Image: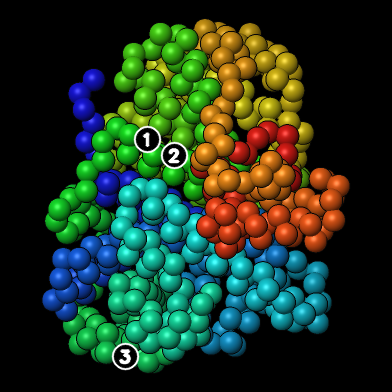
Amino acid sequence: MAALAVRRADFLMTLAYATDLATGHTRDFALRSCVLAMRLAETAGLDEQMRRSVYHQALLRHVGCNADTHLLAAAFGNEIALHQDYALIDRGNIAEIRAMFARALTRTFPTMSPAEVDNAVAEARTVTVPVLAGCCEVAQMIAGRIGLSLEACENLGQPYERWDGLGLPLGLKGDAVRLPVRIVALAQDAVVLTEHHGFEEMIAIITKRSGSAYDPELANFFLAHAERLMVGIDGPVDRETILALEPLPHAVLGEDACEEAYLAIADMIDMRMPFTFGHSRAVAELAHAAGKHMGLPASDMRDVRWAGYTHDIGELAVPVATWMRAGALTQRETDEARLHPYHGERALASMGGEGKEVAALVLRHHEHLDGSGYHRYARGNDLSPAARVLAAAEAFQTAREARPHRAGLSDAAAAAKLRGAVKEGKLCAEAVEAVLTCAGQPARRATAERLAGLTPREIEVLRLIAAGHTAKEAARLLEIAPKTADNHIQNLYSKIGVTTRAGAALYALERGLVQQGIHAA
Ligand SMILES: [Fe+2]
Ligand SMILES: [Fe+2]
């Protein structure tokens, strides 16, 4: 195989697409705000290093948004709708914040009395502040894994900070909020406000928030040039435009760095819900092993592994609250869920070269040989051996994982289910047998030296909290005192260098510590 060379910006665009889905933004929102932020940086005459920081901040500002999403969904319901509201309000205005939470609560819990809504709104901060802290920590960890500079990572720790010190979670004020962070916050608000209220109203709102949400000097500069800066900003943005905006030198990833970038995407997807922890890694490893068993060419195995890491990226378009509900989905929810391979293909297809092959596999991961799969009802002649092995690996792994509406099957029962699907003409017999033969292979496991000197007990506690258990639940499951569990958590946080549960969960995912059978749901 020829040596691989992929622009890192391609991975940033895929992550930007994914975060647009997860936060309910419109198509290409992050790309459009990147164009605007870079125009602003260029017009202000910022140097190359500062423009690079703006570029990274614009594309990845919300990349940590999947941290602790299940907590948001449990408290406020549809977290995507909450994100949409959050993007529009003045996030330093208590009345607007309270109104946003009240809307979410009445939408989700229609039988709640006004007094109950008031109480829940008063408690909202205790849920959201730790979640936002987790989002910031996770964003920094993901950016580090795709090789961004320390400065870019640190900027991603400030996405929700404001000029007036009323931002979260740190309450940084004035220049302590870094310039690229201030530029991107203003640019993203300008794009979203224009979409919802039109240009004139956007100008009025930015003017009103100058000096509170935004650095007044920056806001004045933007307002003075707004008409020119905003030209065409509501239109689609193509890959070439974003590639051309990256300041020199352009970052290019070789095969190993691509592998790590795809893994970072897998973890970003899987950490959204406790019951999908480790799902994408497991599918990828199983599909890769089965592909090898079947004698697929090396390039196909690489594609199938990378498609395994990313196959469910399109699921981010569906609210966590929907996936977490124990009951049946409505027809509309089912239709939305069945479109996730489409969104997945779109997220990856814009990548040049290898990305197209990966996207083609992602698009087909729920298709069946007899045309009974989804969402394109493809048939056998449209399903390559690589597509068949990915579909078989995905079906086996999903069958043995628990979901809120059903228990996970034993390996034997999952194998019987897949062989039944072969008999019905849905799955490929050779691919299924290869997957089942390989299913006993151990997943990647962490070695002791990669685990920052954690004790066996601390590793047990880490696995449990990564799977969504609270400290109290971990104490009960391990039959230790809650205070002892707390001590273990504090010790392990400081050893692995994180400060939030979400950060610890991502650390556990990265090192293959999440196993089936310990999921919280
Ligand atoms: Fe999946
Ligand atoms: Fe899927």
Residue kind at label 2, given as amino acid type:
Leu
Crowd around label 3: few <14 · some 14–19 · many ≥20 (10 Å)? some
- Which percent across, then down, holds residue 392? 55, 20
Crowd around label 2: few <14 · some 14–19 · many ≥20 (10 Å)? many
- Which percent across, then down, holds residue 394? 56, 27
Q: Are marks 2 and 1 in contact (CB under 8 Å)?
A: yes
The numbered disc on residue 134 is none
Front one among 418 and 264: 264
Q: Quadrant of residue 262?
A: top left
From this viewpoint, is residue 421 visible?
no
Tell me the SS state at disc 1. helix
User: According to the image, label 1 marks what residue?
Assistant: 259
Q: Quadrant of residue 213?
A: bottom left
Q: Is mark 1 within 8 Å of ligand 1?
A: no
Q: Is residue 347 above or below residue 130?
A: above
Q: Residue at x 23, y 62 (%)?
A: 52
Q: CA distance from mark 3 to mark 1?
A: 43 Å
The numbered disc on residue 263 is 2
From this viewpoint, is residue 348 visible?
yes
Q: Is residue 384 left or right of residue 83?
A: left
User: According to the image, label 3 marks what residue?
Assistant: 216
Tell me the SS state at disc 2. helix
Crowd around label 1: few <14 · some 14–19 · many ≥20 (10 Å)? some
Q: Residue at x 55, y 43 (%)?
A: 451
Q: Quadrant of residue 237?
A: bottom left
Residue kind at label 3, given as amino acid type:
Pro
Tell me the SS state at disc 3. helix
